[in-house]
């Protein structure tokens, strides 16, 4: 018995739908981290300030690696890539590693300025 096979090739194209305005972004995508919107940089600054606050509590020598780790994580949550994420990592390491910055909420202040500037761009 011989069966005849149709040699026609079918090509399929896939189009991904655009996310609707009310759709929730994926939390694992780079731009969809935990720190979204205009409050995101403020929350990121708070996290860096909290890391700086705990480093003198017997963790003084670990300030640089803790700050670098927090800066790297926060940069990923903010959706930063490449050199911007590395800069935030380096700044976090210096900020948490240098003594005397414990009572200065520099991370929160910078986050507040960044968040307000970012909100102004979208409201126009």
Image: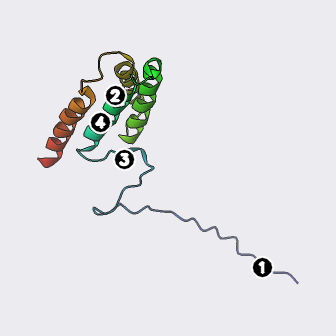
Viewer-proximal residue among 20 and 33: 33
Q: Give x and y (percent) for residue 76.
A: 41, 38
Q: Quadrant of residue 39?
A: top left
Query: How many discs appear?
Result: 4
**Dot 4 corresponds to which residue?**
46
Mark 4 is surrounded, within 10 Å at the Cα level, by few (under 14), some (14 to 19) or many (20 or more) other residues, namely: many
**Circle 4/circle 1 CB separation < 8 Å:** no
Residues 29 and 33: in front is 33
Q: CA distance from mark 3 to mark 4?
A: 13 Å
Q: Can you give x and y, in whole percent of width and height, for residue 73 in the image?
A: 43, 36
Q: Nearer the viewer, mark 2 or mark 1?
A: 2
Whichever of labels 2 and 1 marks the residue nearer the N terminus, that label is: 1
Look at mark 3 in the image and give the residue it sits on: 34
Q: Are marks 2 and 1 in contact (CB under 8 Å)?
A: no
Which is nearer the N-term, disc 3 or disc 4? 3
Instruction: Kindly identify the residue that appears in the image at 29 percent across and 20 percent down.
Output: 101
Q: Nearer the viewer, mark 3 or mark 1?
A: 3
Graded by Cα atoms within 10 Å as few (under 14), some (14 to 19) or many (20 or more), the crowding at tag 2 reads some
Q: Label 4 vs label 1: CA separation? A: 69 Å
**Alpha carbons under labels 3 and 2: distance apart:** 21 Å
Query: Which tag, 3 or 1, sits closer to the chain's start?
Result: 1
Residue pointed to by mark 2:
53
Instruction: Bin the neighbour count of mark 3 within 10 Å (Cα to Cα): few under 14, some 14-19, many 20 and up.
Output: some
**What is the CA distance from the residue labelled 2 to the residue labelled 1?**
76 Å
Q: Give the mark nearer the N terminus: 3 vs 2.
A: 3
Location of mark 1 (residue): 4
> Closer to the camera, 74 or 32?
74
Quadrant of the frame with the N terminus: bottom right
């Amino acid at each position: 018995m011989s069966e005849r096979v149709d040699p026609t090739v079918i090509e399929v194209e896939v189009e991904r739908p655009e996310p609707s305005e009310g759709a929730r972004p994926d939390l694992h995508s780079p731009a969809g981290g935990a720190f979204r919107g205009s409050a995101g940089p403020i929350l990121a600054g708070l996290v860096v300030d909290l890391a700086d606050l705990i480093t003198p509590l017997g963790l003084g020598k670990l300030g640089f690696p803790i700050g670098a780790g927090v800066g790297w994580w926060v940069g990923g949550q903010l959706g930063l890539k490449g050199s911007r994420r590395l800069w935030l990592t380096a700044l976090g390491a210096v900020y948490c590693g240098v003594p005397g910055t414990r009572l200065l909420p520099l991370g929160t202040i910078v986050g507040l300025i960044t968040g307000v500037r970012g909100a102004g761009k979208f409201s126009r």
